[in-house]
Image (tube, rainbow, N blue to C red):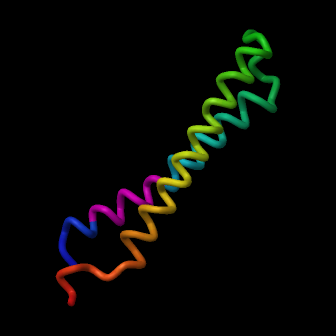
């Protein structure tokens, strides 16, 4: 396995953590009321943006994980 493929695998795993972060922040903005100094419409807009970006990033991460972990490398033959 070459170093480039290993780096792609590490990046794909890191992307899973970032997806969890974006979805968690979106959930926090939309459903928890600890941010009372922000108006509810602002919190919902920000939270839904984080959630939609997290879902987009989850899809891209899934595609990358399938590509990096479950396809044969061209060099392996």
Residue at the limit of the structure toward the bottom, as seen here:
77
Report the side of 22 relative to 29 (left or right). Answer: left
Which stretch did the figure color magenta?
7-15
x and y percent of residue 45 in the render?
69, 22
Q: Position of residue 56 (x, y in %)?
A: 55, 45
**With respect to residue 59, does 22 lie above or below?**
above
Query: Position of 33 compared to 6: left or right?
Result: right
Q: State the residue at coordinates (71%, 15%).
A: 42
Quarter of the image where one finds residue 10: bottom left
The residue sitting at 58% across, 40% down in the picture is 22
Say above or below: 76 vs 44.
Answer: below
| Up-down relation of residue 62 to residue 74 (above or below) | above
Quadrant for residue 35, please give it.
top right
* Magenta-span inclusion, residue 71: no
**Front position in the image: 54 or 14:** 54
Q: State the residue in front, 29 or 63.
A: 63
For residue 36, side relative to residue 14 (left or right): right
- Point out residue 74 in the picture as x, y percentages from the top left corner: 22, 80
Residue 13 falls inside the magenta stretch: yes
């Amino acid at each position: 396995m070459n170093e480039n493929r290993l780096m792609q695998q590490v990046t794909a795993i890191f992307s899973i953590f970032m997806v969890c972060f974006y979805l968690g922040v979106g959930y926090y903005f939309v459903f928890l009321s600890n941010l009372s100094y922000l108006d509810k419409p602002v919190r919902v807009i920000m939270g839904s943006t984080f959630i939609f970006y997290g879902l987009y990033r989850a899809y891209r991460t899934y595609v990358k994980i399938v590509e990096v972990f479950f396809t044969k490398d061209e060099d392996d033959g």
